[in-house]
Structure formats: C-alpha cells, structure tokens
Amino acid sequence: MLFPILAQSQVKSKLWYDGNSRVMYNRDALEGTLKETDTVSTRSNGGGFTILDLGFHFTPVDDIEIFSEVRLKNDFGGMWGNKSFVELRRLSAKGIVNNKIAFSVGDIYLKQTKFTLYNYEQELSEYEPSVFKFYRDFVNYENYYQSNYWRLQGVQTNFSYNMYNFIEQLDFDGFTARIRGLEWLGKPELLMIGGSAIIKLSNKINLGSHYVNTFEILSSSNGTGAYYNPVLNTQLSYSGSLKDIPYKMLLEGGFSKRGWDGDSLAPEIKGYFTKATIKAKGKKSEVNLGFRYVDTDFRSIGAQTRRIDYNTATTTYPYYSNNYTQRKVSLLDIMSDPNVYNQNLSTSLMNYNPMYSSVSPYGDATPNRIGLTAEIDNLNLTDFLSAKVQTQYFSEIIGQGTTNKRSFYKSALHSLLSLDKLLSLNNSFNLEGSINLETVKRDGEDFEKIDFSSILYSGSISYELIKNLKIIAGAKVFYAEGNEFIAERDMYDQINDYSNNTYDSKETILIGGIQHHFTDDIYFTMQYNQFNVLDKTNTYDEFSMGRLIFMFNMNL
Amino acid sequence: MKNLKFLLLALPFFFTSCEKDKIEGPSLNNLYGELTILESLNVVGDSADFSNGESMYFTASFSKQVNWKIKIEGSSGSVKIISGKSNEINQANSLWNGNSTQLPFFIEEDCDVVLTFEMHDDTIYNQLNIQSPKLYNDENTVLITDFENGFNPNFTGFFQAGCTKALTIGGAGQGIKFLQQFGTCDWDWLIGYVDYFSSWWYDDRENLINDPSKLYFNIMIKGDSTISTVTNLPNSLFKLEFYEDENGDDYHDANSEDRFDYEFDVNWTGWRMVSICYNDLIPPSSNSGNGIKEPNKIFKVRTLLLANPESGFAKADVDFLIWSFGSPILN
C-alpha cells in the first residue's frame, strides 16, 4: 500500500518545527604497509561539517499542511560564510479533501509491494550489530532512505470506502511521479504512474491489486525510442489461527513488460513472478516460510533499482598506491560513505558486486530465481538470550550461458546476549554477534563451474559505564573466496558477455569508542575505526586506514 | 475455506513445472569452452573449372562456435581468405567461385588450404587443385585492357625523358603481361601518363550502365613503397582522370565538358586491386561541364604516375583495367 510518510502532525498551531541536526568530524589516515609504500597519497585527510535540517510545517487551514525542510550546512574549515550552504532539502504539501480523500504533492515517499515499488536495504546490513547503526542511520538519512520507501516527486492520493455487505472495505491509492526530467539533447522525460486497490472481504481475507507503469515521453526528446515498463502485482492474504497460534498466508503473483516503443532493435520482454508465504507467531518466536519464483525476464524499475552504485568513486581515498589505483567500493564504503549510494530509479539492471550480494542482489525481485525461504524472528531462548535466523535456497530458472544452473544458498544468524540480565548488573551490558553466509555453485565443465562463498562475521560489545554513557567496541570480518561470473549487459539489458572473476579477499573493520545517549534520538559518539581491505589475488594493493570520528546527532 | 488455504499453498508450486530449457545470454561454451574438431576439413568440388562457373566449398564441424579462417594460397602467390563464425563450415558459409582476396589472380595450379581459429592454436591443412581459373571478364564487366595482347598503340600518353613505360612479361597481376611505369623526374611532378580512349575498349558507350553509384572502375597497381627522401612518406602518387564527352562529338572539350578525378598514394608493395565507385570521383575545381556523372559518356580514362620532384624515384605498374557493374571486381 502507499503511505506517504510525511511527518506526522497534529494540527495544534499554524506553524511548527522539526528536523535533524548533525555534527560530524572524521580524520582518516593511511596505516599498515601502505603508509610506507604509498608515497603519492596524502598521509591523512580529514573533514567535518555541521548540518541543521530545519523542517517547517505550516497549516494555513485545518486540512492542509505545507512542509519544507531547509538544510543549513557549514563545512569545517570555512570562515565568514565560506563553505556554508543553504539548500532546500524537501518541499511538499498534504491535505484531505472533504475528510475523505487524502493527497500529497511535491517530494513524496512511496512504496508499494516488493515487486512493484520497493527500496531494498543495502547489502550486508541485515542483522548488523547495533554499534554500527549510527553509520547506517547517517547513510540512509543523507540518501532520503526512509524504511523501504523511494523518495519521488509527484502527486499521491488515497481514500477508502467502508461497506457493509460481502465487501467490508475498499482502499484505493494512486500516484504519479516524475522520475527523470527534461534533458537537453538527452533522454526523454521518465514518468511513473501507479495505483493500488485493496478489497477487504472479511477480517480474514484481503485481496489487493497493485500496478505501476514507468514510461518515457517520446515527444520530450529528439530520440526515436521510448521506454516502458508496466508491472502488475495481485495479492491474496488470509489470516487465521491454528491451535491458538495466529498465522497469515499471503499469495501473490504478477507480471511485467519492458520494451522501447519505436526502437526496432529493442526486444520486448515479458516476465512473471509468484510468491507464497506463511507467517506464524508463537509465544517464543515468529516463523516465516516462503516460496518465490521470479522469471528471468521479470523487470521492475521500482523494485530492482539498487541502493549502491558500484560505478561511483569513493569519498575516502578514491585513489591510492603509487600506481594511483582507483579504490573499489568495499565494505567500509558500503557501511559509511553516503556518496556511493543512489537516489534515482534506474531503467536498467544496475551492476552489483557478487562479493557482497550474490543471492538476491535485487531483493525479492531478483530475476531468474526459484526457491524457498525460512526465517525465525524474535526467538527468545531465555530472558537474556535472543536470536533470529534465516535461511534461503534458490536456483536459477534457466542457466546463464549454459544449461547448468546456479544454486544459491544464504543464511544469517543474529544473537543478542544481555549480560546485564545474566549477571544481574544494573548497567546495560550487551554482547551481539551475527553471521551472514552466501554461497553460489554451478556444476559443469571447467570453463563454466562456479564455486563462490562469502561470509561476514560481526560482533559488538557495549557496556554502560555510567548512566547513558557506553563504551562500545565492534568488529566485522568479511571473507570472499572462489569464482563467479558477472554478466555484462547491453543497453537493452540483454547479456552479451561474461567476466569470470576470481575472489580471495579479506576485509576487516574494527571500531572502539564511547557513545552517550541523551535520549534515543539525541546522542554523540566518538570512536576510532580501523579498516583493512586485503585482496589475496594481488589484483589490488592492500588498503589500510584508520579513522577518528566524532558524531553528534539530534532528531528534533 | 480449507480449499482456499490449500489453493494458496499449492498454487505457487505449479510454476516449478514452468521451467524453461533455453539459456540466457551467449553460450559460455562458445566463449570459453575448449575447441574440439568434430569433423576435419574437407574440400567438396576439388579440381573445379572456375572458368565454367563451377565452384567448390569446404566442410568441417567443431564443438563450439568459433571465429574460423580458411586461407587458400596458390603457387602463383594468389590468396583467397574465407572466414566466418560458426560451429560448422558448410556450403552456405564457404562457397568459393575462384576469386582472389590478394592478387595476383589464381591460375591453373595446386593450392594449399589452411584452416585456423581465433584464440585457438589448432590448425588444419588440406590441398586443392584449380583446373581452370575464374574469368573476370563477363557480362557484368567491360575490360579496358589486360595487356595480354600487347600494349594498344592507340592508347597514347606521355612519359618524361628518362622515365619508363614498358610492357613486361612475367610477374603480372593477371595473365602474364603488365605495364611497368617508373622513373625519376626532378623538374616536374609528372612521371608519365597513359590515355585509355573508350573507343578502343568499348565500341558502344551507350550500353555502359549509366548509374554512377553502381559502376566501379578497377585497376591492378603494383607498388614498391619507395619512401620519399624528403617527406619520409610513400613517394608514388597515382591519379585517375575520367573525361566525359557530353555532346557526343568524340572529343573532350575541357571548356565545356566534365572531368572527374581520384588520386591516392601507392603505399604498398606488390599487386593490389584498386576499385573506385564512379560516384566517388571528384571534379577538379576548374571543371566546366554540367557536373553530372554520366559514365555512358566516358571519352577516356587517363592514369597518371606522379611524384614530388624533390623526392626521387617513383613506381606504379598497372594491369587489368576493367569496369564492373554492381560491385568491385573482387567482391
């Protein structure tokens, strides 16, 4: 369903404020052997800023709210206005017509289903220990990632009807957004329209249909081809109870079409998908079992656009070593660099790095997958030990370049040990650990075999020294080993070649410092981080870096 | 309701039976697989009489799609290259009518055949015999001269003192005779020229197709890549001039009729066929005609050997001057 997540408001006054403030300073320095061998790069560099994002909510009448967010930014090192910026970060309005039809215009946040419009989390963020959360909050905030919504610009409306016969309630949502504006001698304008209709047949059964169509306006450019990508998703859900255990079954399916009008060379492809899940909530855990089939030719711009753009340059040491090698996006950038992230929907499948995400690089909408998933959440083993675990097994539907198909296996485990409860301490004392494992295999002749695995070990410890002041430490150790083929695609997303990549990599991230929470949303942290990226295939030089970082965050 | 629950759970599994048996993208076997020769190279139609319109082709098959190249080399030095990308060589992709890729033309001779592959070291050898070579002069061509009957004295011209124009036997691009042209002239760019009047090679000019986009002038030129001592570039410059007789009075009037030119460096060694589409000819800046390319009104073709007077020796022998319709003569 579509829910614009404009800031919640209760009309109490004509004008009220909210926002976010952040102060950040970091100093990065080369470490290890690189410090001695790299005579080209600077020994260290640093930077920081103060940001105030001030949101103004103006309610001229009871049914209308106008919202604007202005960013005041001052980079450290500037004086008297130098390196100071003022920019409009967000502008929108929302309201209700006759207490029946809600609408939002301007910068709106939209989400539908996982196959039509959905902003999937970045790789390796699942089950991440909480001491790393401040980095992820920073990255997500800077890129307008709120939950799994995409920030778009357009108009959205929704309304519902209550009925009293065999249909209890009807909910409707609709939107239109401008994904890409006019480009001088460039691509045509790209628009997206979508809508949802959800029929509540009873308290137990819901039937929903969701539709998104993304298309280019040919007349807005001098080109001869116009992209189109309609996607339809229908969902049927049933809620029930078995031996006092509530459960919910969801069956969904749909199809997509993708092509270019007026371009005789462009293929039109049609793909479909289906997914079934059953979710049960017991006393000690929640269990979720699922089946998923996504066709090779399923394309959905709204659900398959990835957050990380591996073609961008990293902010920290984009080039290093005496060979002036461009540093590839690695785990440290995924964790801490907002500039490697993408904010725009992509009409073609974006590149991904199998090292960090090979099983579902495009989330549930990853094409050419059939398989099963299982997840146990909120597994409270004791009052001081909880865990969550998931496992997925997939296979390709058709092989890439061969009749042999890849098989994918993914599993993840997270556990939280509350030592304060175990040892009856007054101060908070938590130990967290998690493992993310992915494997890809393909049999066959030597030239087509794949045997790849990656594993991320994460752990953290936080101890409350005095009230709200914690000493924290965390570690991530990532291994990737084996080989995997990366498909190279043409402008129409058709595979035209492959590159067989060999991986033998180890990445380490260590953090340690203090963190003080004034409230849940107001805190500061000061840490020392150490990063190491070691490519044992010797394709790239080892990169080692230390970072001293201070961050103050305040959500108003 | 029970049925509905069953339906919800069972429906997705029907999709498992929808598996496709094709593959996505290009075949990995074709890109990275080992090459195995499943059927070796065979010549079908050996000892063909190309002059009679016969042809021959080759057969072979491989374990993968591969870029292959068949090189046929005669004892005359003529070479024919046939290439393709496939997992099978057959009549459709290897039919040979006896033409050449590298001059001279094939003669009655035995030829070596070598099959090689891109990115693979495998090489397959075979041999064939040419019973009778291909005749290029047919209904789609108009031969100006191949010098086999000597040099037509009506083809007038001029060569500077000390420069040579000589009919030579042996080492020709086609047949056994060709025209040598060489010399050094330190006072003028012109080494020499020959006028090939159309009245001596084509007695009914009206029948020469009048579509300049489909008419090709072909000439064999043998260069020696002599490098200029001044410019350090190939020294021999070759120019073709095509004179039209627009009013049909058997005379080209430079003040009122068209001339079209084409010139190029002779920067190669040995024989090479130069083919020019009539449409690609360029009028000189002083052209006085109507500017319309009308090949059926051709009056004469002049071939000029030029060289920078400061740079020394120049050489460009010629053979087999021929018009072809529709395509260059070697296509």
Image: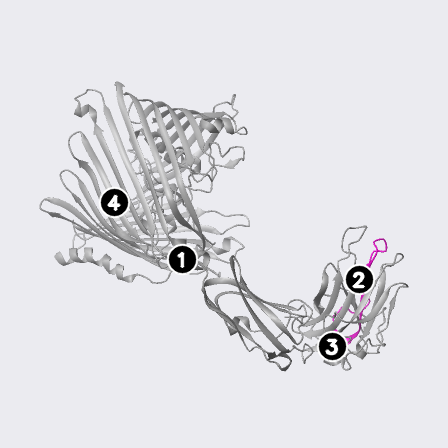
* Mark 4 surroundings: few (<14), some (14-19) or many (≥20) residues within 10 A: some
Badge 2 or badge 3: first in the primary sequence: 3
> Which three-letter amino acid code belongs to the residue tagged 1?
Gly
Q: Which residue is mark 1?
A: A401
- Return the mark for residue A391: 4
Magenta segment includes B268: no
Q: Secondary structure at mark 2?
A: strand
Q: Secondary structure at mark 1?
A: loop
- Do marks 4 and 1 both belong to one polypeptide chain? yes
Q: What residue sits 66% from the left and 66% below the top?
A: B102
* Mark 3 surroundings: few (<14), some (14-19) or many (≥20) residues within 10 A: some
What percent of the width, then of the height, locates residue A223?
Answer: 52, 56
CA separation in Å, label 2 and label 3: 24 Å
CA separation in Å, label 1 and label 3: 53 Å
- Residue bounds of the magenta highlight: B285-314
What percent of the width, then of the height, locates residue B165?
Answer: 84, 68
Tell me if I can see residue A113 in this picture.
Answer: no
**For the residues carrying marks 2 and 1, which lies nearer the camera in this image?**
2
**Chain under disc 3:** B
> Which three-letter amino acid code belongs to the residue tagged 2?
Lys
**Chain under disc 4:** A
- Return the mark for residue B143: 3
> Which three-letter amino acid code belongs to the residue tagged 4?
Thr
